[in-house]
Structure formats: C-alpha cells, structure tokens
Amino acid sequence: MTGYGKKYEVIVVGAGHAGCEAALAAARMGCLTLLLTMGLDTVAQMSCNPSIGGLAKGHLVHEIDALGGEMGLNIDDTGIQFRRLNMRKGPAVRAGRAQADRMAYSARMKLVLESVDLLDLKQGVVDEVVVKNYRVVGVRTREGIEFSGQTVVITAGTFMRGLIHVGMNNYPGGRAGEPAADKLSDCLRSLGFVVGRLKTGTPARLSARSIDFGKLERQSGDNEIRPFSFMNDKIERNQVDCYIAHTNQKTHEIIRNNLDKSPLYAGVIEGVGPRYCPSIEDKVVRFPDKMSHQSFIEPEGVRGAEMYPSGLSTSLPADVQLQYFRSMVGFERVEIMRPGYAIEYDFVEPLQIQSTMETREVAGLYHAGQINGTSGYEEAAGQGLLAGINAALQCQQSEPLIIRRDQGYLGVMVDDLVTQETTEPYRMFTSRAEYRLLLREDNADLRLTQLGRHVGLVSDSRWQRYQEKLELMERAFSVCRDITVTNKNARLCSRFGLGELKSGVTLEQVIKRPEVTVRQVEAEVPELTGFPEKVLEQVEIAIKYEGYIARQIEQVERFVELEKVKIPDDLDYAEVTSISAEVREKLIKYRPSSLGQAGRIQGVTPAAVAVLNVYLRKKTREKTNEAGR
Amino acid sequence: MINDDDTIIAPATAVNESGLAVIRISGKSALLFLNKFFRPAVRSKEMKSHQLYLGHIVDHDQSVVDEVMAVYMASPHSYTTESVAEVHCHGSRQVVRRIIDLAGLLGIRIAQPGEFTYRAYLNGRIDLVQAEAVSRLIQSTSELSRKSALQQLEGHLSRELYRYAHTIKQLLVQIEAWIDFPEEDLPEESIGKISLSAIGIYDAMVNLMASYRTGQHVHEGAIVALAGLPNAGKSSLMNALLKQDRSIVSDIPGTTRDLIEQSTQISGIKVRLVDTAGLRHSDDFIEQEGVRRARNILTTADIILLIMDGSVPVSDLFIDLLAEFSGLQVVLVINKSDLCLVQDDVHFFSGPIVRLSAKYGEGLQDLVDMISSLLLQDHLSSSESPYITERRHYETLLTASQHLNSFIKNVGLVDLDLLSIDLRAALDSLGQITGVITTDDLLNDVFSSFCIGK
C-alpha cells in the first residue's frame, strides 16, 4: 500500500451526476478535493435516457442551479431539444425537459471538472473506505494507493456488485461494457451498513439509419427555449426532432410468448425495480387490455446514429428484443446497436444517513445518488450537491446545510429518504411535495440563491444578477400596486373589460382577473414595459395565485413549528415511556432529527409525537435547571 | 394535538343529565367567545380576569341558550397558562352541545383527549415530575378515544366515509397522473366530467351533516315542546303522551306557569317532552316569567307541537303565534276534536297537521307517528342510511365538504395544480377519521391504474 502525499479535505468516489456535483461544490467552496472515477471517459455519463428534466426533475435542476451547481449550465450548453411541459396545468407544475447530446454532456462536464482549482480528477477503483474510530480518514484503491481525506462522499451508482441481465445470461458489470465495483459494498457492510439490492433497466439502442421515420409522428422542440440555468437568458440553437412510435398486439404477443426467457419472470432477479419505470414485459403483463404502448424515439446526439426508444426497457434476450422491435411500425428493418438489459446493484439503506447526507455509522462519510436507493440523474445530482456542500462545511467547521420540505424538492427528497422505507428506487414526483405551489421552477432562484450564497457556492456574478432581479421585482410590484386605472382611461377599461368603474382599480386588481395576462397589461401601461420576462412572470404568479399561495404559506408556518423542535441523535428512546413498543422501534430505527420528522415516519401516531414532545420538554428543563444551579 | 396555536374547547366535567357542567376553552379566542356569546346579567365594560360573572349564553340571534356563570382567566394565570374561559352551565347534554357548537362558529375546535393537560405541561404549568403522568394520560386517552371512534364508525357510517375518501382519492389520482406524467398516453377525460363524482360526494356529505341533528336525538334525546294559547289543552296532551298525570290539568287558563319536563320514548328515540305556559300577556309576574321561559325552550326545541283549540274559532293571537314560530319545526295539533266543532279551515298553515282528542285519546297514535317520522326524517327508520352523532365527525365533514365545494366551484376556472390543493385538503380532513392517505398511497394507485413508464 502506497500513501499519497496530498491530504484531501473531500474525496468523492464516482464521477456520475452525483459525484460531479459533489466534487465541484466542495472544490468551489475552497476545499482541496479529489474526484476518483473508474473511467475518465465516462464522466457524467447518461446511462439510460439521453435527457434531463421533466416533471419534478426539471424542478430539481433549477434548484441545483440556484445553489450554484453545474447541471443546469451543463444541459443548457449541450441540449439538442428543449420542451416545456404542462404549460396549461398551473404554474407549479410547468417543467422544462431537454434532450442532451450524451457525449457532449459528458465532455463538457469533464472540461469543467478539469478547470476548477483545488480539484484533482483521477482514475481509480475504490475498494475500501478507511475508517479510524468511527471516523473516515481516506480511501484505498484497487491499484494499491491510499488517499487520505477528512471526508469521503460515495456516489457509486449501479456499480456496487452490479449484475447485468440479458435474458437468462448474466454477468458482473456496472454499466454495459464497464466492470462492477465488487469490493466496496462488502467494505460498507463490514462497517455496519445495511446493504440491500435494487434493480433497474434500460432499453436497446437502435440505429437511426434502420428506422423509417416517415412512418412515425414527429415531435419538435419549443420555438423559444427557456434555459434551465438562472445565468442564461436565452438559448439560440438548431434543435433536433424526436419521434413517437407505438407497440402493437403483435409486439405484445411476442413478448408474452417469451416471458419464460425473462429473468424478471423466471425469478432470477431478486432486486426490486421501480413501478414508475416498468420493463415492457411488465407493462404487457400488468395491463393486458392496453392495445398499444407509446415510445419516444430520442436521438442520443447531434452526430451519431444511436436512438433511445423510451419506455421499452427490458431484460429479454437480444434476439427477442430484435423480434419485437421489428413488429413495430417504422421498425420493420431496425438494427439494434446495443441490446437493452436489466441491472441489479447494491444500495445502502438510506435511513442510515442523516438529513445532511452524512452517514450515522461513520463520521465524515457521505452517501449520494443511487447508493441511497434513488434513481434519476437529477435526483443523484441534487444529493451529490448537498453531500459535497455538507462535506465541505464540515471541513470548514461550519453548520451543515439542510433544506426543508417547504424550501425545495431537494429538501423533500432528503427528508423522504430518511423517514420512509425504501421499497423501490426513489424518484421525485411533484405530488411528493405538500407545498407544491411554493416549489416552482420559476422561483427556485428566489428560494435557494441566498442559501447557496451563504455556504459560499454562489459566485459574485450570480449573486449580483440575483440582486438585480430582486430589485426589478420590487419595482414591478410597486408599479402594480401604485398605478390605478380609472374611468378616464377608457381604452384600458374597454381593453380589459372593466366596464363602468365606480372607483379606480389598481393594476394589481386588473392582473388578478382570470382573463387578463401580465403581458397584455404590459403592452398598455408604459410603466411596466422594459421589465424582463422573468420579473413580470413573478409578478403575475404572485398576484394571480395570491389566495392559494397564502394558504400554503400558512400551512408552512405550522409545519416549521414542529421542525424547530429538535431531537438529539443520541436520545435514549427506552427512557420515553408511554409509547408503544412498535412506535419506539420505529423511532430507534429512523432516529428522526425533529418532532416534525418523527411525525412523518409511518406508524408514529400524533399521540406518540405529543408524548415525545413532553419528554423533550422535560429534558431541556432539567438541563436549564442544572445550568441555573 | 401537536399544533398548539389554536383554541380548544371541551367539557371539563362528565356530561350527564344532572347538576352542573363546566365547559373549558383555552387559547387565543377564549375571550372572544365570551364577548360574543356571554351576556352578563350586570353590564360591564369588559370582563375582569378571575371574576365569576352571572349571565346568559346567547346565540347569534341573542336568544338565550342557558343561564350560566362564566369566568375569564387571562394568560398566564390559568391551568394551561393560555387565555382560558370557563362556562358553568346546567348539566344537560343539549346545552353543553349548543355551547360547543357556538364555539365552533369561531373556529374553536374540540380538544383532543388530554390536550388541556398537555398544553399546561408544555407551557411549564405542570411540574416536571408529572411528565410521566402527562405522557400516560395522552397515551391512554388517545387509545381510548381511538377505540371509541372506531366503534362509532362501525357499519354504514364507516362505509360511507370510506366511500367519500375513496372517491376523492380517485379524483386526486387522476389529476396527479395528468400532472406528473404529461408524456404518457393517459386516457383523455375532461376534468369537468370527472368532477361530477365530486358533486355526488359533496351532496352525500351535506346530507350526512344534516343527519348530525338527527343523530343527536338518538344519543341525547330530542326536545318536543308543547305550545299554544292558554287552555288549548297542552297539559292534557302532555299527560296523554306520557300516559300519566304529569301536568296539572284544569279549565283555568294559565294553570301551567313553569316548564314541566319529562323524558319518554317515542319509537325508541329518547324524547324530552316539555309542557309550557300558555303564551299570552299577563300581569302576573310568575306567569310572565313562565311565558319567557316557554319562548326560550321553544326556540331550541326540535319539534314544537302547536296546539289549537278546535272548539273555538281561530284567533288573531293564534295566527301571531304561528308567525312567531315560522322557520321552526311546527306540528299543528287541532285538539278537542271530540267537541265536534272542528276547524276545517286551516289553510293558513302548510306544515303537518294532526287532529286529535287529548281527552279521549283519539288520534293520539297519529301524533306519535308524526313525531317519530319527523325526528327520524326517514334517516333511521330505514336503517340503511348512515348518520353522525359525534361533534368531531361533524367538524371533520364540515371542513372536508368546504374544501370539496371549493374544488367543485373552481373546476374549469383554475389550473389543475390548484385544484389538487383543494382535493388534497378535503382528503386530509377525512383522513382524521378514515386514516391518513399518504403520497405513497396515491402513487400506488397511480401506478396500478395507469401504465406509466418510460
């Protein structure tokens, strides 16, 4: 074993979407950082679909961006088709989605990693986390090098004991064509972590040259691109098209006839897969009445022929895959370039981490991404960012950053991870957020830039831009409050159907009308022109949805009260009498950090929370009494 | 219970039909309650803390609910250290219920078991040593109330409430699927169409809430008051209904001067029959007081049997009486049918009418049937229909129905994500009885109802 001279403050293991954010955050916050990856050519690899964003995921990207993360900038630069979803379903559930040029995405991220001071990017396979007295001190690689680090962030993706299934054949691998990390999870197990097994899958990649796109429905990007990053105002770019294809009865019959060759149905796969991302064989079996399933055919880049058929992940053998694809209209002569496969991998039960992403078992050790039982690039990146920030804050001996459920999807995600049982890979949905109306893409900057600045990740230029936006918003709001429309302004009255006004109405009241948009008002009122789109958008949402927003804010106030009552991590639940054995067991298992969190654990009753509150009160009072003596 | 910024109310004494009851209110709105509904006998600018006042609880129409003693205890010198109001009223369930209902109008909610003590403890009023006792109290009472709530929920009512929750959940599942999976080929249905089922559920909720009063009868007995001009035969009818001589009967008008009350059963429902003084002007002080009390009880009665002497022409005084009782549940009883001078011309009254002879018992069964059918309002007679008796259930339904109503009104006017807020709130309210429905439950339904996955 050779020691490596440098003493790192933060070591990040794995350079996927979580690892890149973690390493960049730590280094940008001023920590000497090492990013170790098994393959320098697969940094920020999109192992599955070549796209970023979508519902709740787009929200996460905006939040990562607001805190000073990289994902938003990276997709803005390398996106090849942009769409905004749910434009007519309400402000909180509009979300951006972009197709990425997979290779460009990876290449740009690598360049960024290479350009940051204090960040060393190295290839190496980590076999072991080195721990002394329950505190991490570094990592050991297969190559026999020991790197010392004050903190370690593990972002292992699907690599820990990864097992790839194609039909009844299976072989170890972290991703098709890449080896698995076979030792790391054993090491974690020996450190006391509970390790479980999950499954996910990906469809085949098809050759564009062999698809008859003329027979498919075309789907183009939006005319006007709305960037993910707060730092970008607009994106001018030629976009590529996606296509919509459909399975048919013949396809389903082929799949049904070959179920015995599916390792899922033959019981070979023990890991649990996600319900929201079932394999095509699952869909066919579970929804026998559905005559056809839809698939988006997405290009993996501007150059190159590989196409990604969404919704058709599978573990069936390659020949069956070819057979069922060729049964689909437009795919009669299709060629598969890479077969689809299922993969099983080890994850570590996330109830062993705290809301800071630091593990309870080993101080200074952080877990982020799929190791926590989650799925998705955006979910991984968000956790990586938080883990990187908190590892850096620990090195700087500062208070950790915890985002509350009312502040961001990032907070919802982490809180869910530490209070809910993981029964399948965790993916973010907007329905997971109880204060959804407050957690919009359009206000992610308003929610989180300040926090990002506080921890030292938000750059001066971003901060200044943010201040300018706040100032403009303030001005736009006062225009709307101060300017009054009266009878004298007949044109405005007729334009907005105000009828005979007895007394004047403010612009705010005009904008509140369901049929009036802020754009229309802007066109008529010179004082409002010149404000940027993003500023007017905030004005419109705040005015139009005032009532609902106020309701949610009121709920948040009540919610925060219980979050404030902290529970010490070392609380001896045996001392809390008058709670049932079942509830006590849950509390010991999850060790909630606040009274609110305790209440969110399934099976913990309101009465039990009250009893816990009584006990905590007693403890604090005893302490103050002692101090008073 | 873990939110302690609102105001709570509960009887502090066991409620039964005798003696006094004490109702305690704790929280910011305690004084507001007294200012609004307590009318002190001696007017004073404001209530002093820790001083017992004699007066009346009056409802929003200023009619008297009960004569009470009330005390206000300013924070922090109270049991909970919050502002506390206590009302010492008569120990009738009906009165206690009405006072709690009035508090409900101010958003004051029923306290959870042990909640006063819990607040007292949290606010440092109770000694540390008692933490254990407080915990045990919370734990055991919540267990008890959970069990009793479950018992109350057996059968029809529980099925009905689960039906509401299920329907609302289905709506929410549909909306959440539309929101979270815009790129899936989900079935296209108009939100207007699916909201029809919300309207069905809303109507059912309103009906169920209407049964709250009916439900009360089963538990606590309904008040059936006898009223009329002097010497119409109220007391005779009272005795006939009770099959005993409870009221003194004479030909002298004004014989009954005070309320005479007796409990009985009509079709298995507990009924408090109240005989009142004949309603007339009198210079007799005692009779005046009797008339005043009669008017009070009549406004709270579930049914007023307005008795008309069938042997004499209808007087203007009687028409005035009818007008006075408009809006109340009145049964016109035409008595003395035996005297063969029956007034056929009763076109001035459109409600239920029964003709009888209290003296000979003729037509008495018709009246009994009429009373029972009115009390049950076809609710319990066909025992298929659910009804509610618990204030807590009523409060829950009220909140849930308000949210659901807001949903229905907003369909087509506001965006899906806002509609989901109303539905979610309705579901969360119902969840207080039917058990919380988590996001995971919703997602489960989304994934089992729709083929999702890309």
Image (cartoon, coloured by chain):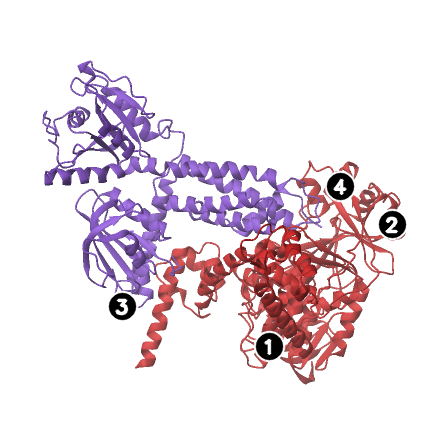
Residue drawn at 52 percent across, 49 percent down: B422
Question: Chain A hue?
Answer: red
Judging by the rendered image, the residue that carries numbered circle 3 is B127
Disc 4 chain ID: A
Q: Residue A485, how many percent across, how many down?
A: 60, 59
Q: Nearer the viewer, mark 3 or mark 4?
A: 3
- Rounded to the nearest whole Å, what is the CA distance between mark 1 and mark 2? 50 Å
In front here: B380 or A491?
A: A491
**Dot 2, how many residues are within 10 Å of its Cα: few (below 14), some (14-19), or many (20+)?**
some
Lateral position of residue A227 relative to residue B91, left or right:
right
Question: Secondary structure under badge 2?
Answer: loop
The kind of residue tagged 1 is Val
Q: Which chain does tag 3 point to?
A: B
Label 1 vs label 3, nearer the camera: 1
Alpha carbons under labels 1 and 4: distance apart? 52 Å
Q: Chain of mark 2?
A: A
Label 1 residue SS: helix
Residue that label 2 marks:
A335
Query: Which numbered disc, 1 or 4, marks the residue that appears first in the sequence?
Result: 4
Task: Specify the chain shown as purple.
Answer: B
Q: What kind of element bears circle 4?
A: helix
Earlier sequence position, callout 1 versus callout 2: 2
Estimate the x, y position of residue A310 in percent, counting from the top left: 75, 51
Label 1, label 3: how many angstroms apart (C-alpha)? Answer: 42 Å
Going by the picture, which residue comes out furthest to the bottom?
A5
On the image, which quarter does residue B192 sit in?
A: top right
The amino acid sitting under disc 4 is: Ile
Cα distance, mark 3 to mark 2? 78 Å
Q: Is residue B32 left or right of residue A206?
A: left
Which residue is labeled 4 in the image? A255
Q: Which mark is residue B216?
A: none
Q: Which residue is mark 1?
A: A455
